[in-house]
Amino acid sequence: MYFCTSIHRFRTSFFMRETYFHIRYLFGRENVWAAVEALLQHDRCGYVVVADGVVLTRVQRDLSFRKVVHDSLFAICDSSWVPLYIKAIYGRKREQYCGFDLMMDGLQQYQKYRMMFLGSDALTLAGIQRQLDDDGIDKAGMTFLELPFKSVDDFDYPAIAQQIEEARVDLIWVALGAPKQCMFMQRLKPHLKRGVMFGVGAAFKFYSGVAEKRAPKWMVLSHMEFLFRLTQDPKKQFDRCSGIVTTLPQTIRSEMSTKRTNEQLTIQHFFSLLRVALGTSTQPIQAMTAEEWLAVYEMSRKQSISGLLFMGLNKHYDSTEIQRLGLKRSLRLKWLSTVMTLERVYRKNLSDCKELDEFFRHEGIPYCIFKGQALHRYYGDDAKARHYGDIDVWTPTISVPEFADLLNTRGISHKVKYAHAVFAHGQGTITEVHHTPAFFRHPGRNRRLQEWLKDQFAHCERNEEGLMVPSVEFDLVYLLIHIYHHFMFEGIGIRQFVDYFYLLRHLHLQAQTSDAERQRIEAIRTKAMTTFKHLGMQRFVAGSMHIIHETLGLEAQALLCSPDAEASKTILHEIVCGGNFGKFDKRYPRNTSNLLARGFQSLRRRVTLMRFGVGETLVSPFWSIWQIVWRRDHEH
């Protein structure tokens, strides 16, 4: 059991390596030491590169040295500037873990690991031993081995490895200076049977107190440690800093180009896998690296489609084939956990919907459940893999304030919004009760929409699960209106288009059962398109059809209208950038409390998408002002 656990920790830590600037970093102290512990438990050996600015620069210029770094177990981020570059380019927060801190953490585990200090000079090694005594660290399990100053090719590696073997050490701290210590560790590794080497360089001098001192903490935190080191050894540090500065612009440009390439590749892999999951592609999935699989998983999570992707993958490939495709066991287990959670949510929501059915029937309120849970009939067995949020209920015979009063009399806590009342029901599932399921901001369009909605509630029906749901005719129009609203004002992901894909495919399959059914379905489609034209949504509908046809792979015969490739480019760009309901859109950050900034961001989005709804865009500023006033007086 312990063997399996440590192997899993090793694989998990290694799987978390991230490649930036051609260096495979492992971030986080816990991850680093989990990987080291797992390696030592199984008597494995290797080396860890402490990647400072010198290593970063050399990797960009020297392909042979890049291989030295790639042959390592992983690299830790010694530079305080690299996390800033990563934040600027990728928007990801990463932490520095310098060689000195790594060695200090290792020394705190002196009772657990035997150690060797390899390199530097006798004076520095003696200073380290004195400092260990001062810190109360027992040196009984430590060995100190000075190395002569010579070229990296001239060391007697078998003899050094023999001394390490005789000392039976676990951790080997190497100090020969970068990049020499990296090449030294690569050449020494084949002669070792066990142990993890760390190229910590100047950490020996810092800790010994004999030569250089480390910069004050405030300078380290301010990313100015290089200035302090310039004062300590001007000639050496100036040469290093000048090399870094001259290489940095090209390094940044190269990484930004790599980012764009990787993003495009991730998008291709993601949609290729999605088409396989939907059963619209017979093209085999290409094998991917661990990092590419992780990027696809992250995109599926942001798009709230991870369950469907994983279920489709397992439906078409067995375990051996999936392993051949490069999907690591650790990520597969994580993905499986997501799917199992989705199945629990599916059962929980279904149970809550049935309780809501009893509640509304007991109160004598006509209702129907729309959107998420009402789409089970189109998904079939795939419904369990869909991501579900809150439960949406349509009650046209009772207004939102009247329903809020009813909840008050029942002692049910709730909130009142403009178009719905919100309360927790059943097992804590959020339920939104709407007087109308949709609205436009433009008065004329909204009037036409509300007139159409008036006739739809009478056609609600009970589905196989005993719940009141809208008709197929309603879903065919409403789902695209819902998508359009979020597209214009918030952001939209691919999940909502997948919902519409399943609906169109359901109708297409029904149309193939008989001539009479084909004529009926054709009449429904024609009527839906007439409604969309009446509401001024033709461009958006045509763009959506192109996405469902080209990106998701639905047959052209199943579409509502001719696809519009030009309109789909903008829609697909919003899907990829924003994720589910625009929650991951870095262009329009939502975490600001500044109303003016949020208003400007919202206006900028509407102007960008104006060609999909000029009237909605022009009316929106006035509607937003009215909403602020309404909320002040009504929301509670």
Image: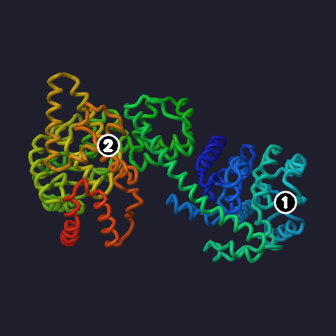
Can you give x and y, in whole percent of width and height, for residue 147 in the image?
Answer: 88, 58
Can you give x and y, in whole percent of width and height, for residue 515 in the image?
Answer: 16, 22
* Circle number at residue 358: none
Residue neighbourhood size for the residue with mark 1, other residues' Cα within 10 Å, grouped as few (<14), some (14–19), many (≥20): many
Q: Residue at x 30, y 38 (%)?
A: 501
- In the shown orientation, is residue 207 left or right of residue 626? right
- Nearer the observer, 618 or 220: 618
Q: Which amino acid type is marked by label 1?
A: Gly
- In the shown orientation, is residue 573 left or right of residue 194? left
Asked if residue 555 is positioned above or below residue 343 in the image, the reply reads: above
Q: Residue furthest top?
A: 514
- In the shown orientation, is residue 613 left or right of residue 173? left
Colour convention of the picture = rainbow
Q: Residue at x 51, y 40 (%)?
A: 332
Mark 2 falls on what kind of element? helix
- Residue that mark 1 sits on: 119
Can residue 340 be seen from the camera position used here?
no
Can you give x and y, in whole percent of width and height, for residue 492 in the image?
Answer: 33, 51
- Residue that mark 2 sits on: 565
User: In front of the other: label 2 or label 1?
Assistant: 2
- Please identify the quadrant where the N terminus is shown: top right
Asked if residue 220 is positioned above or below residue 565 in the image, the reply reads: below
Q: Earlier in the sequence, mark 2 or mark 1?
A: 1
Asked if residue 418 is positioned above or below residue 557 in the image, the reply reads: below
Q: Rounded to the nearest whole Å, what is the CA distance between mark 2 and mark 1?
A: 64 Å
Mark 1 falls on what kind of element? strand
- Please identify the quadrant where the C terminus is shown: bottom left
Q: Which amino acid type is marked by label 2?
A: Ala
Quadrant for residue 277, please give it: top left
